Image (cartoon, rainbow, N blue to C red):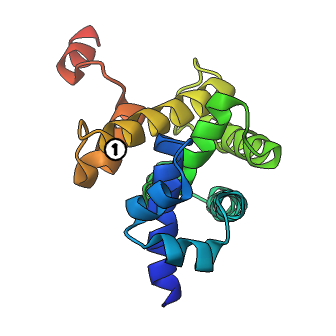
Amino acid sequence: MHPESREEELKKLALAFCTNPRRTAGELAAAAGISKATFYRVYGSRENLSRLLSEKAREKVSFLMELVNEEKGDTKSYLRKIIHCCCDNKEFLMLLCYGYATGSIDSWCQDTYTRQMTDFFLRGQKSGAFRVDIPASVMTELFAGAMWSLFEGECHGRVASASLPDYWEAFFLKGIENQSEREEEH
């Protein structure tokens, strides 16, 4: 099987794992569209799969943090890139969010993500791209919360996949205040 096919399979397994962590190996295999025999041949056990998914999630966080750290210039366009990168890897990031909610998250992933995203928002504040009345650490929490909520909403059919990055960006950069109300105040 091609690596790209395994990647898609791992995404399905990650999603199945975080939406119902008590699934059996057979149920996980069915959710990924593979046979139970293939599951055991490729992944060995549910525990091995869990380790592999954690490694994959860590790899995705590393890639995301490289993107965050390469930001030079237009902070808002980098935020768009970060949002799209998160959406491209949502299944693995959902697994991390699930781990955060249950207290089983890889501490390196949590610490690295929190520190580097906070630094990113702080750089954005210093450049004038982001408002300064909300601390960068709060922006990090809001960003992660929006990520989890939107990904969860998509899983349950409440948020359209194609529009998810646009909604996230609009909500995060512009807030939910009515633009005409904002203009009337000034």
Name the residue: 64% across, 55% down. Answer: 68
Q: Position of residue 47 (x, y in %)?
A: 71, 57
Viewer-proximal residue among 105 and 133: 105
Q: Residue at x 56, y 41 (%)?
A: 22
Instruction: Name the one closer to the observer, 141 or 106.
Output: 106
Image spot of residue 161 (x, y percent): 27, 51
Q: Is residue 174 left or right of residue 180?
A: right
> In the rendering, at what x and y percent does residue 21 appear?
56, 42
Can you give x and y, in whole percent of width and height, for residue 142 in the image?
53, 28
Q: How many marks?
A: 1
Mark 1, secondary structure of its residue: helix
Q: Quadrant of residue 137 in the image? A: top right
Q: Residue at x 74, y 48 (%)?
A: 109
Q: Classify residue 50 by image quadrant.
A: bottom right
Q: Amino acid at mark 1?
A: Cys
Vertical order, 74 against 35 (above or below): above
Q: In the rendered image, is residue 124 in sight? A: no
**Any part of residue 11 in sight:** yes
**Image quadrant occupied by the C terminus:** top left
Q: Is residue 57 above or below residue 171?
A: below
Residue 70 position (above or below residue 156): below
Residue that protrudes farthest toward the left in the picture:
180
Q: Which residue corresponds to mark 1? A: 155
